[in-house]
């Protein structure tokens, strides 16, 4: 604030200086221009003060809720869900080894759910340091969930998701979700077929990124990814009883592709098509997140596999990315009430409604560059 006031004073100083230099005395027109400038500047400072006050008030309410919560609520519930997924692994491998088509299908769905909980929910929370207060454990879980279980680079995940997407949500050229766009693919192929290739594309993309890493980091990433893929293959052969290489690899890919479609859908539905901002005229954080993020309705399957923060609490997650899934759910009524009470948008839309919109306006949303939104009066 002191800086903003200082800028106003210096602007006034410059204006006065220019008038005196030009005409030797301040004219009526100069005074009018000066008055208008000062008025606009003061108005803009008042608006900025109000934006910052809103974010501070909301942060205070949320932090009070966090302070009143136990460890179980803050981290325990989500750690237990991820641990529960690991505990279901033996049942999944045994079901995949049965001859009954029903049991085989159940095993496939169970393994797909376990894989999504560990690699989407687990990796996402670990990348945001929401599962543990310890830096070492956070690093360990991030590498384990993302690289060993998810065949992707933990560093690339943090760089792309936390440092780019979260820090620059919907800022064009930075966190505008354009990495999800493949404009050369027709709409139905992109939306319903290409996602099935995610398990194959993921390790290929990870390997492609290694050229920018230090030799040590590249070697570690290769080793952890190979360890995860090798362990998955070994368990399918020795526990489930798969005998041919092709059937084992096919089963591996199918298990990893069960939630690929909603994974891609959710990532594009919650940002693309909403307000996008110029990097030169970024709105205040509370406007950026409320205009550029959307919540999907609570869905029993997706909320538990991907986590509340990626489905029905995405707005809360973007405003407070350090909160775990359960805490995002807990503060949701506080955040939604606060935003509505203060005349800010709290954007929500149904999964099928977004899917229809993306099918209808595929070119506009996924092929052409997005238009820039200017939040008149609040930027
Ligand atoms: Zn996130």
Image (cartoon, grey):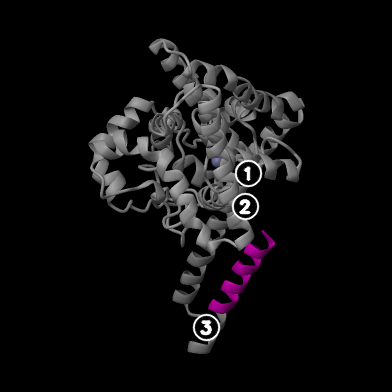
Distance from label 2 to label 1 (Cα)?
A: 10 Å
Q: Is residue 291 left or right of residue 49?
A: left
Comparing 262 with 107, the one in front is: 107
Name the residue carrying label 1.
Answer: 143
Residue 11 colored magenta?
Answer: yes
Residues under numbered marks 2 and 1 in contact, where contact means CB atoms less than 8 Å apart = yes
Q: Is residue 86 left or right of residue 102?
A: right
Residue 271 shows in this picture = no
Q: Residue at x 63, y 21 (%)?
A: 87
- Label 1 CB less than 8 angstroms from ligand 1: no
Comparing 35 with 250, the one in front is: 250
Q: Residue at x 66, y 64 (%)?
A: 3
In the image, the segment drawn in magenta is 1-15
Name the residue carrying label 2.
Answer: 220
Instruction: Tell us which disc is closer to us: 2 or 3.
Output: 2
Comparing 378 with 365, the one in front is: 365
The secondary structure making up most of the magenta span is: helix
Query: Residue 5 lies in what quarter of the image?
Result: bottom right
Query: Residue 335 lies in what quarter of the image?
Result: top right
- Label 3 CB less than 8 angstroms from ligand 1: no
First along the sequence among labels 2 and 1? 1
Name the residue carrying label 3.
Answer: 18
Distance from label 2 to label 3 (Cα)?
A: 62 Å
| Residue 297 percent location from the top left of the image | 45, 24
**In the orientation shown, which residue stands out farthest toward the front?**
243
């Amino acid at each position: 604030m002191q800086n903003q006031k200082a800028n106003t004073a210096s602007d006034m100083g410059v204006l006065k200086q220019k008038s005196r230099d030009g005409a030797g005395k301040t004219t009526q027109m100069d005074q009018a221009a000066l008055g208008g400038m000062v008025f606009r500047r003061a108005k803009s400072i008042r608006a900025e003060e109000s934006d910052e006050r809103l974010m501070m008030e909301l942060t205070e309410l949320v932090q009070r809720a966090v302070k009143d919560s136990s460890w179980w609520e803050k981290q325990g519930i989500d750690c237990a869900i991820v641990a529960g997924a690991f505990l279901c692994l033996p049942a999944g491998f045994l079901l995949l080894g049965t001859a009954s088509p029903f049991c085989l299908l159940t095993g496939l769905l169970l393994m797909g759910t376990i894989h999504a909980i560990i690699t989407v929910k687990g990796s996402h929370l670990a990348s945001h340091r929401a599962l543990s207060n310890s830096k070492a454990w956070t690093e360990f879980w991030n590498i384990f969930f993302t690289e060993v279980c998810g065949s992707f680079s933990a560093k690339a995940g943090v760089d792309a998701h936390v440092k780019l997407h979260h820090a620059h949500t919907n800022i064009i050229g930075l966190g505008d979700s354009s990495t999800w766009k493949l404009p050369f693919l027709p709409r139905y192929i992109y939306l319903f077929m290409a996602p099935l290739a995610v398990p194959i594309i993921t390790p290929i993309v990870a390997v492609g990124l290694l050229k920018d890493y230090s030799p040590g980091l590249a070697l570690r990433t290769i080793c952890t990814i190979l360890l995860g893929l090798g362990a998955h293959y070994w368990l399918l052969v020795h526990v489930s009883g798969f005998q041919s290489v092709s059937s084992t690899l096919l089963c591996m890919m199918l298990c990893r592709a069960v939630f690929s479609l909603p994974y891609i859908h959710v990532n594009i539905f919650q940002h693309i098509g909403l307000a996008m901002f110029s990097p030169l005229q970024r709105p205040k954080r509370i406007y950026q997140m409320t205009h550029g993020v959307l919540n999907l309705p609570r869905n029993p399957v997706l909320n538990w596999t991907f986590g509340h923060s990626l489905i029905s609490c995405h707005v809360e997650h973007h405003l407070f990315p350090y909160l775990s899934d359960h805490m995002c759910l807990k503060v949701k009524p506080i955040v939604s009430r606060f935003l509505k009470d203060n005349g800010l948008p709290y954007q929500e839309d149904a999964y099928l409604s977004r899917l229809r919109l993306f099918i209808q306006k595929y070119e506009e949303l996924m092929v052409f560059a997005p238009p820039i939104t200017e939040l008149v009066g609040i930027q």
